[in-house]
Image (cartoon, rainbow, N blue to C red):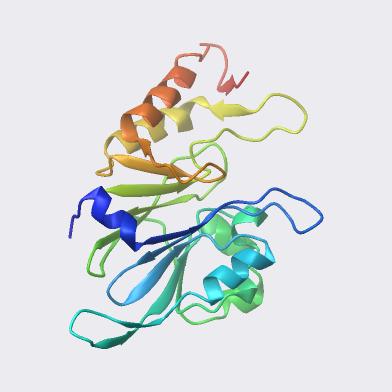
């Protein structure tokens, strides 16, 4: 089911990212999208606040006509960096969707839980709105996943960011950046949400223009593009 972006916003709850401090570690944005049968949770963060946000989502709700519905919790992890997924052992979930690299970084207790799915090709699910989970070409982290909801909005995590280089400039892999641009051009969503930014979805074309500007900085003798 494809729905209008403005209608979809009323289904989304958002816990903003937090920076490292005395109160807790760096923790990515956490999003919860309400479907007909489940909350679809994108990333679970690293802070106590993020764990509480996910675990306290209201699951027993009353829908139109007074019918009571018990919602499940389905979690999608964008990638394996700690600020996005380290809370997993603390989270109560029914299903978990991860890429292979994230699965490799999960501890044995998570891998042994029922309902864990490794996503290596596009997965479409109808939950009153269309849920699409798929791998996205990415310089930032291997095995990153994108979540598209209702054909209108795509949650990208950190996938549009460069590789973090602690010993020099951050950089994009030329081939992966090209693949990402082509991939995102084919995405049905017209609004993109990236982690560690205010929840103000960006227009698809704006994000593509930014990535294409970086791609235009490539040099023929290098396989990476350094970010100033």
Q: Quadrant of the C terminus?
A: top right
Which of the pair 14/79 is nearer the observer?
14
Find residue 56 and report its horizontal and vertical position in percent. Answer: 53, 76
Image quadrant where residue 25 sits: bottom right
Residue in the picture at 55% in, 76% down: 55
Q: Is residue 20 above or below residue 214?
A: below
Which of the pair 62/47 is nearer the observer?
62
Find residue 140 and report its horizontal and vertical position in percent. Answer: 57, 39
Image quadrant where residue 62 sits: bottom left
Q: Is residue 163 shown left or right of residue 57?
A: right
Q: Is residue 226 above or below residue 149?
A: above
Residue farthest along the right direction in this orientation: 22
Q: Quadrant of the N terminus?
A: bottom left
Q: Is residue 102 above or below residue 108?
A: above
Q: Is residue 62 shown left or right of residue 92?
A: left
Q: Is residue 178 above or below residue 213?
A: below
**Residue 212 seen in this snapshot:** yes
Which of the pair 39/163 is nearer the observer?
39
Find residue 187 and report its horizontal and vertical position in percent. Answer: 28, 42
Find residue 200 and report its horizontal and vertical position in percent. Answer: 43, 42
**Residue 151 seen in this snapshot:** no
Residue in the picture at 33% in, 34% down: 204
Residue farthest along the top direction in this orientation: 220
Residue in the picture at 37% in, 80% down: 71
Label count reads 0
């Amino acid at each position: 089911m494809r729905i209008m972006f403005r209608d979809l916003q009323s289904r989304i709850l958002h816990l903003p990212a937090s920076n490292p401090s005395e109160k807790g570690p760096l923790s990515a944005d956490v999003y919860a999208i309400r479907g007909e049968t489940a909350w679809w949770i994108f990333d679970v963060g690293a802070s106590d606040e993020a764990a509480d946000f996910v675990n306290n989502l209201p699951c027993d709700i009353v829908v139109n006509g007074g019918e009571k519905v018990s919602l499940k919790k389905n979690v999608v992890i964008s990638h394996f960096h700690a600020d996005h997924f380290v809370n997993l052992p603390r989270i109560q979930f029914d299903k978990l969707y991860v890429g292979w690299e994230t699965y490799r970084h999960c501890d044995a207790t998570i891998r042994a839980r029922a309902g864990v799915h490794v996503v290596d090709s596009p997965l479409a699910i109808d939950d009153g709105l269309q849920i699409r989970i798929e791998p996205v070409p990415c310089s930032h982290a291997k095995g990153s996943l994108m979540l598209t909801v209702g054909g209108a909005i795509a949650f990208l995590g950190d996938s549009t960011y460069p590789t973090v280089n602690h010993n020099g400039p951050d950089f994009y892999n030329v081939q992966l950046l090209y693949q990402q641009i082509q991939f995102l051009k084919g995405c049905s969503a017209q609004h993109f949400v990236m982690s560690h930014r205010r929840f103000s979805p960006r227009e698809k074309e704006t994000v593509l223009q930014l990535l294409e500007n970086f791609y235009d900085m490539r040099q023929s003798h290098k396989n990476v593009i350094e970010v100033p």
